Amino acid sequence: MVNVGVGKGEKMRASFKKLSRLLLPVGSFTFGVSLIATPVLGHQDPQQPDSYSTTTGAHPTPPTADQPKMTSSDRAIAQKIRKAIYADKSLSADAHHIKIAAQDGKVTLQGSVRSVEERNKIFNKAAAVAGDGNVMNKIEVTPSKQ
């Protein structure tokens, strides 16, 4: 029997096999490049402002009525009071985390503590720094649940 030649169907199958062997690596390469390029395309130049930023430092806002601007002397008063409170290890963690706001030499204490004794200790420490009559005590007493 003499083989006259390869038929048209066999040639197409051979070409398809060669093409499929080529398409798999090319497709994989293209997919890999697209995965790498995606984060690069989403990169924003750090020099440009981000109008969608959720960080508080991105766009400073002027102080509001509940957050007045503190001068350097007010900041120093608040820091001295905070240091005096932190130095007292007999106070609870709640007492160490009260809010201290100072404006024009007047101090406001806000938050909650576990006892009247803690409330009084914090008030006395603030009065020793800011002076008598310059401290407004808005600290609430909420006993711990046991």
Image (cartoon, rainbow, N blue to C red):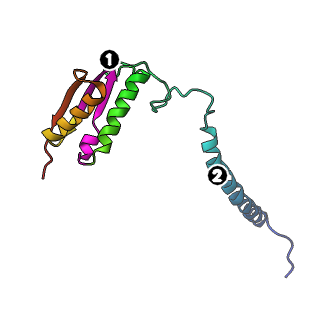
Residue drawn at (32%, 33%) of the image: 81
* Lower position in the chain sequence, tag 2 or tag 1: 2
**Residue 18 percent across, percent down from the top left:** 76, 63
Q: Nearer the viewer, residue 4 or 42?
A: 42
Helix, strand, or loop for circle 1?
A: loop
What label does residue 65 carry, if any? 1
Helix, strand, or loop for circle 2?
A: helix
Amino acid type for the residue under numbered disc 2: Phe
Q: Is residue 63 magenta?
A: no
Q: Nearer the viewer, residue 73 or 113?
A: 73
Q: Nearer the viewer, residue 91 or 97?
A: 91
Per the image, the residue denoted by label 2 is 31
What is the spatial separation of the Cα atoms under label 2 and label 1, in whole angstroms? 54 Å
Reply above or below: 3 against 83.
below
Label 1 near label 2: C-beta < 8 Å? no
Q: Residue furthest bottom?
A: 1
Q: Which residues are magenta?
A: 90-110
**Residue 80 percent across, percent down from the top left:** 36, 33
Residue drawn at (73%, 61%) of the image: 16
Report whether 143 appears left or right of 9: left
